[in-house]
Image (cartoon, coloured by chain):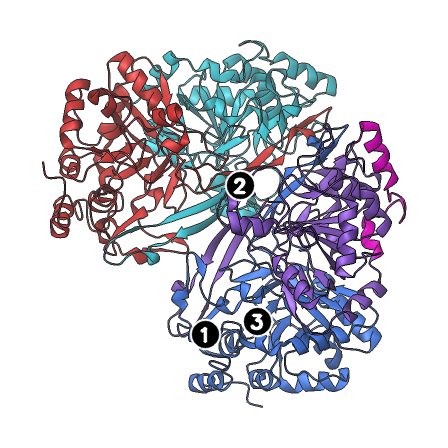
Chain colours: A cyan, B red, C purple, D blue
Amino acid sequence: MATTYTTAQIAELLESVSNWGRWGRDDQRGALNYITNEKRAAAAKLVTSGEAVSLSLPLATRPARDNPTPVTHLMIRSGQTGHPLGSSGCADYFAIEPHGLATTHLDALCHHFWRGQMYNGFELSEVDFQGAHKCAVDVARTGIISRGVLIDIPKIRKTEWIEPGEAIFPEDLEAAERDHRVQVGEGDVMLLRTGRFKLRRTKGVAAIAGSAMPGLHASCLKWLHERKIAVLGSDAVSDVLPTAYEAPLRMPIHTGTLVMMGVHLIDNADLEALAEKCARDGRYAFMFSLLPLVLERGTGSPANPVALF
Amino acid sequence: MATTYTTAQIAELLESVSNWGRWGRDDQRGALNYITNEKRAAAAKLVTSGEAVSLSLPLATRPARDNPTPVTHLMIRSGQTGHPLGSSGCADYFAIEPHGLATTHLDALCHHFWRGQMYNGFELSEVDFQGAHKCAVDVARTGIISRGVLIDIPKIRKTEWIEPGEAIFPEDLEAAERDHRVQVGEGDVMLLRTGRFKLRRTKGVAAIAGSAMPGLHASCLKWLHERKIAVLGSDAVSDVLPTAYEAPLRMPIHTGTLVMMGVHLIDNADLEALAEKCARDGRYAFMFSLLPLVLERGTGSPANPVALF
Amino acid sequence: MATTYTTAQIAELLESVSNWGRWGRDDQRGALNYITNEKRAAAAKLVTSGEAVSLSLPLATRPARDNPTPVTHLMIRSGQTGHPLGSSGCADYFAIEPHGLATTHLDALCHHFWRGQMYNGFELSEVDFQGAHKCAVDVARTGIISRGVLIDIPKIRKTEWIEPGEAIFPEDLEAAERDHRVQVGEGDVMLLRTGRFKLRRTKGVAAIAGSAMPGLHASCLKWLHERKIAVLGSDAVSDVLPTAYEAPLRMPIHTGTLVMMGVHLIDNADLEALAEKCARDGRYAFMFSLLPLVLERGTGSPANPVALF
Amino acid sequence: MATTYTTAQIAELLESVSNWGRWGRDDQRGALNYITNEKRAAAAKLVTSGEAVSLSLPLATRPARDNPTPVTHLMIRSGQTGHPLGSSGCADYFAIEPHGLATTHLDALCHHFWRGQMYNGFELSEVDFQGAHKCAVDVARTGIISRGVLIDIPKIRKTEWIEPGEAIFPEDLEAAERDHRVQVGEGDVMLLRTGRFKLRRTKGVAAIAGSAMPGLHASCLKWLHERKIAVLGSDAVSDVLPTAYEAPLRMPIHTGTLVMMGVHLIDNADLEALAEKCARDGRYAFMFSLLPLVLERGTGSPANPVALF
């Protein structure tokens, strides 16, 4: 398999996975359109035991090598100010960069640009100091509720985790499908496990703190496009980093999904408990829910995705 | 029906609805324990058409008479800083008081105290400057997924909205059950519509900006307790305000639910679209999901609850 | 006196007060260059009694009609968390928009643009998402310490305050000089009192909450330029608002001072106590100090200017 | 010289330097009372050349080992949003913990407690979630303007810097006075240089990132008290850390100055340029100004102190 591309080849590759215009010129929802009412209803039918698994890291309030922009969490009132004989309350405050490196979050389609444009050809000038006037995170205000499918790469490679910088190829995805007895299809939320947080928990933050990330090789784009996934999530950032491409194409998966296909991304999902549950049950498809905050003009949202079995 | 109580009577009322100890001395989840795996699986079975309705107001970034603590939303990078020939990205930042008056949010059990204690007898000193060490919002990290039931009071009172300050009684709840052909039961998320946002949209913010709120009279506490609801939500704050009780009991529903019963509250849910959908379908029960941010030690979370039909 | 201008006339007027290139092509300090060491030493010699007067409003943490972006002030630790028998501490946090309408602040030269440029011809693209790469507030990091001169317009017009929307002309400035027995000169910090906060305290916030402001008519620009002031401050925003000019020239004094002359502005200074002191002493010149926070790339700084007599 | 104390001895020492009641029972300004009008006027008379030196670090927006709580600095509008043919503006936002480890700041008297009390016997309960109701930073709203005296310890010890953890004794202070031909006296702002930022610039952040700090030994308290200083500042935190005392007395200089003497502290002042200037001129006294933000109920303020020669 060819693992490098010329600039012309990558441009051609990106063009070949474009969904621009597929849902109309004004569409801002992209591949969320694959999640029809029927798809949601079918996802709900997957629920049998009712067991729920959270895919969110805790919001991290301490700076760390993998968390340069920690969440600020402060109290406005504590219990200590309350009336000792009556009722009282407490409240807090937090400030957050949704795209923080240690935050489980949804990337809105406006989060990424290619050659001056975002999904469906909207100009990057649509994102200014007021925020995103097109493709903001509130296009998903009714939630991302669909069938979720876990693709557990360390499992099929018989390793504990994929090393930072190591690429994942279409044949890995297909090997996982065979192993997991599941097939990724139209409207699915595909969750790609690299074992990154197992690495962090085993070897400490230094092991994951650099800019290298395990993730999908650009050659997976066509595969994702053909499968018509609605959303792609990962315990890293979906792209393998560093990529072999010359700038200015740093993250071909981000570009191919967010910009060309209109596929929303979920970064930094904690897939460890999910992987254990799937392996235990021998079942890799479930009802998936992610309910983003309704931040009009927002470029993303912190999120607590939940898998329901 | 008696609509006022002496201090002794209210203390007795609160005591009578206590769930302290019901799920063990160390329990911090309260009535969320009613939401078993079976309850979640049954909720998923309610889904037929797959239609989803958001119950969240947009996060309000402008100060208004009903929004003294607006959300701060700022950009970190916009499209304008991007590489015109290559890939680039944008990102933002927001700061929020989850309990803001114009924010759809979940109240954690630690949010409210009565006579120096929170749910299950935890001391209010458990909430200090680091946040809540007991009953924080992350006890719901696997989400609040259950059967939701809408109780539409304006519908049964044949009015557009309930006026601020007007109380709702147990007989209203039962009249709604009869009208809606639904019965609130164990583990349900009960959503109480007062029409407050219809009032706001019709008459403007001044109509709802005062401290008066439509909501449940204290006499509803026993009813809620007997029905074993898991969570109570409203398009106001569940309590009727002002109450007739002498301080220091300002909000008997908050006290009775959060502190005594361990019932989480949802404030400022936008129930207008939901009410229209329920009326249209003649169906008032649905799959309900609220996936709070995993803010360890948080006293609440902004939320985008979604009803699935 | 002509009180309106054609677009061509205003362009000519702005050109006529330009200091671009006066202190070199790379200069970012503008008229602060008028404040020489000698000027500072002379300012210190004005001090006789040692009495100090603050010109700062308190940082306003409550939203109000004239404060849409209140300062956020939260505690990180309070006394209540301290060791009762030993030592302990408290700390806080605040978030601020320096240019807030209710905040006493210094405008950096980068705060304003005219036809795509800031002072000395720097391009507006020098201010991006990282902040200001030219003419940021830290050019004043050694402080603005000079002779301050109060120009008390209500005093010479024998009124309590100048009404919002009312313009001040060069002859007013000269009448004030005669009355105050002072002459504004090279390197001075000129403080223009309109009595706006006396109006606010007398009639309430509604009286000042609109967009109208008392301030200098554009015809004052030549006067300010000839006098070679270093900094202009006011208890409003220096410009009379609304102006009579067609957009896109909304604030000719801002444009003429910040962009053309390189004169920093101080907005929303509280000049009431200063005016009383000056009137009592019959003395309108004093040592002035403003020590901006060293916010590299900042577009302004909240400030507590102090007059020393 | 005794360098360690028993708990009883330290309590006695603290008691011996108390100024409680000296300026009345209700006094909240403490040793700022030493800065009389006459003192300020005399300070201004020290100005000869008019040269100004800033003592502030830049507000540090990047996390570092010595900056766990970086300043948040974001843009609200940049040049890029402006009208290309007309006038436009930019603005920003910042959020700060004034007591941050990498921030030059003033500690208000309310910042520190001893045995449940702050300066003048005010209870620590006076600092709650609303902030400080006594001894807040706004007691200094007319500024701290007085004679400043630099005490340059590395100079008299003939070293480049004092190592973290190394203590400074009264005899060092007196040796410095002899060397500098200056005597610290009533109402002075004493600035203690340890060379900490020279160490940082020479050896990098790791050299200063631990919890050890160079600073004054507790035995200096009596000396400071006798000299009747108004304010104490340092390029570290005035206290030597770690101290030899058993908890709960972690920072005897903080306790002795802020709580007992009512002496405000300045932490993390950058004294490098000042030391060079003083050495060059052979002059260690100057006019000192620090103009704190008027943050009512604030426990401190970021500051840009300036020395004027």
| Distance CA(mark 3)–CA(mark 2) | 33 Å
Q: Secondary structure at mark 1?
A: loop
Q: Position of residue C124 (x, y in %)?
A: 76, 35
Q: Is residue D41 magenta?
A: no
The Cα–Cα distance between marks 3 and 1, rounded to whole angstroms, is: 17 Å
Tell whether position C25 is magenta: yes
Residue drawn at 58 percent across, 51 percent down: C197
Tell me the chain of label 2: C
Start and end of the magenta stretch?
A: C5-34
Q: Nearer the viewer, residue D40 or C197?
A: C197
Q: Which residue is mark 3?
A: D264
Q: Which residue is mark 2?
A: C68
Question: Which residue is drawn at the image coordinates 20% and 43% (left, top)?
Answer: B261
Q: Is residue C286 above or below residue C216?
A: below
Q: Residues within 10 Å of mark 2 (few under 14, many from 20)?
A: some
Q: Position of residue B198 (x, y in %)?
A: 35, 24
Instruction: Identify which amino acid the numbered label 1 is placed on.
Output: Asp
- Helix, strand or loop under label 2: loop
Left/right of residue D179 with respect to residue D208 in the rendered view: right
CA gap between label 1 and label 2 equals: 35 Å
Q: What label does residue B70 carry, if any?
A: none
Chain letter of disc 3?
D
